[in-house]
Image: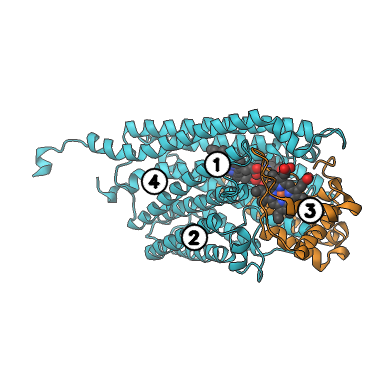
Amino acid sequence: MSETFTKGMARNIYYGGSLFFILVFLALAYHTEKTIPERTNADQLTEAVIRGKHIYESNNCSGCHSLLGEGAYFAPELGNVFHRRGGEAGFKYFLPAWMKAQPTGVPGRRQMPQFNLTDQQLSDLTEFLEWTAKINTNDWPPNIEG
Amino acid sequence: MSSQTLFKFESQKVAKPYFVFALMLFVGQILFGLIMGLQYIIGDFLFPLLPFNVARMVHTNLLIVWLLFGFMGAAYYLIPEEADRELHSPKLAILMFWVFAAAGVLTILGYLFVPYATLAEMTGNNILATMGREFLEQPLPTKVGIVVVALAFLYNVGMTVLKGRKTAVNVVLMTGLIGLALLFLFAFYNPENLSRDKYYWWYVVHLWVEGVWELIMASILAYVLIKITGVDREVVEKWLYVIVALALISGILGTGHHYFWIGAPGVWLWVGSIFSTLEPLPFFVMVLFAFNMINRRRREHPNKAAAMWAMGTAVMAFLGAGVWGFLHTLAPVNYYTHGAQITAAHGHMAFYGAYAMIVMCIISYAMPKLRGIGEAPSNKAQIMELWGFWLMTISMVFITLFLTGAGVVEVWLRRLPESGAAMSFMDTQDQLMLFYWLRLISGVGFLIGLICYLLSFKKSLQTAADDRPVPLPAETA
Ligand code: HEM
Ligand code: HEM
Ligand SMILES: [Fe+2]
């Protein structure tokens, strides 16, 4: 690098540039905070949904599944499983039945453990996945398969 | 040779257990990676003894923890030398080593032998829920332990720098380490709203690997280059500032490439795409930096292997983070690739190239000195080390290529067609088995490389003894 561009100048760009972009980043965080309630239907974020999220976390579902594209890539996306498996009419029957039927025991097929959740927990989990499916995700995923 | 001539301050020795333990955990990480590689193909392998999610937690958490051990070892080694004084408290450093090692081992045993929900309940997750989110699966006591160790560590190296000489290398390194610890505090924040949870989760994950960890990587690289090339410190430090400036200027707003589809507002589609497109720049400058300094070297350092790691980490980080990152970072592309095997391909090469390799770089430079072997291991040992270097690196290139192949087919079958025509997740996986076999075979190649690398440490002891110059009669008298 040429002599006219000194170490001091590089250092100032580092400090000044970082500080500037941290401030922009915080402003965007503020904007995001303002829009999240509407985009996520925060008015429908019930106690059941909150408990459902806790069950999702406490059983490490994200160790096999992705949720809105994040987590693991070993098992189906669950962000839109509500739409894929029954929707308004059927999902509340699908999910508990699915959870109770695991593991399938099909030889060689990827297995999902039996979590022994109570009916109340299954219902909370259903509510959580339904609420999640209705988040405004800029139209992701591209199709029903997730 | 006495250790006095090999490194300047006695207290630099505390780095050694950190490096040794880091490499032990690395072996564990790879073994669990291989188990998962097989579970990807034979779905019920080890089920229900070791479900996939447990193996994955062990694999990724061991990765993070061994890298943290490596970073701490690097800091304990280079900060006294840069600050030109002994470490504030070597005793505290050794004590923290044992605390962190014990917390790490207990956590892994907890994952392996206690069902996750039980572990969560036992460790206070109902009081303060922090668990069950990718990379942040650790029980609350472990997370608190990490904070305690980090605080003691920052106090220790911080006092050393404050009382000693401040160089660009140790100031940038300190900034990176403090940032690492501060951002980790977001691990304790788990909002009830999933979108908000994800939004701040990335403050830990993205702002680590594409923010403060880049500061750590660049300063370790700068230190090793100063040592092995003898190039003027002023020049090296100018490069260092350019690299870290580019890293933060692009990387902070670049966080937006994770905010496309999680419920955050549309402005992120633009901000994330534009700024993350700039993110390969610091990695590219690191390549120029490493090659330039080594070409302009003022001395022939006998440790060729360390120089190879320095060039290798720059190139592989640029490929893994820069090229493979850019591949899927634009919102219209990421719409189709988000959360599929292309992400895994990128994650593997980026973590290996940038962070696993920079840790092996400082280990390669410092270990021969810490072990009292000399400036460099014997030729034979270096050749063995280079076998490890090439086998691991080439295997990682293949792992990345095969996962990318899997990812492209996966997107083609499952993401691109309309609903109705698209293939289901599980059916798509069946189509990818060939790629997964090839990835697994490459993973075995990686393990062989790792074994060669570890054997090189043994070799340097044996051959160091053989190569020892015969003392002159006058000296023995
Ligand atoms: C050598 C053989 C290896 C194999 C077979 C392997 C296999 C795997 C598998 C199957 C996953 C889970 C993917 C999923 O979620 O479905 C994974 C995750 C991961 N592995 Fe490895 N791995 C290996 C080595 C490594 C190395 C050397 C590194 C880094 C230094 C690494 C870093 C990671 C990371 C960062 C993740 C999380 C990826 C993400 O969330 O996208 N792995 N690995
Ligand atoms: C050394 C630096 C880097 C490391 C260690 C790294 C690692 C990772 C990992 C592990 C993930 C998966 C996270 C998850 O589990 O959800 C990821 C995602 C991602 N990375 Fe990086 N990365 C680095 C740099 C970059 C750069 C420079 C870019 C862009 C140019 C980039 C673009 C992305 C994108 C777009 C995703 C999201 C993928 C998705 O939508 O599924 N990364 N990275
Ligand atoms: Fe990122």
Mark sitting on residue B227: none
Q: CA distance from mark 2 to mark 4?
A: 29 Å
Same-chain check, marks 2 and 4: yes
Q: For the point 85% across and 40% down, which residue is it?
A: A143
Which amino acid lies under the numbered mark 3 shown in the image of this protein? Ala
Q: CA distance from mark 3 to mark 4?
A: 58 Å
Q: For the point 62% across and 35% down, which residue is it?
A: B41
- Is B99 positioned to the left or the right of A129 in the image? left
- On the image, the x and y values in percent for residue B150 come to 52, 62
Mark sitting on residue A97: 3
- On the image, the x and y values in percent for residue B134 come to 65, 53
The mark closer to the camera, 2 or 4, is 2
Residue corresponding to mark 2: B106
User: Quadrant location of ligand 1?
Assistant: top right
Same-chain check, marks 1 and 4: yes
Q: Colour of chain B?
A: cyan
Which element carries disc 1, helix, strand or loop? helix
The answer to whether the residues at label 1 and label 4 have Cβ atoms under 8 Å apart is: no
Q: CA distance from mark 1 to mark 2?
A: 21 Å
Write down which chain is painted orange: A
Residue at the extreme right: A89
Q: For the point 52% across and 53% down, which residue is it?
A: B65
Choose top left, top right, bottom left or bottom right for residue B190.
bottom right
Residue corresponding to mark 1: B35
- On the image, the x and y values in percent for residue B21 come to 42, 51
Q: CA distance from mark 1 to mark 3?
A: 30 Å
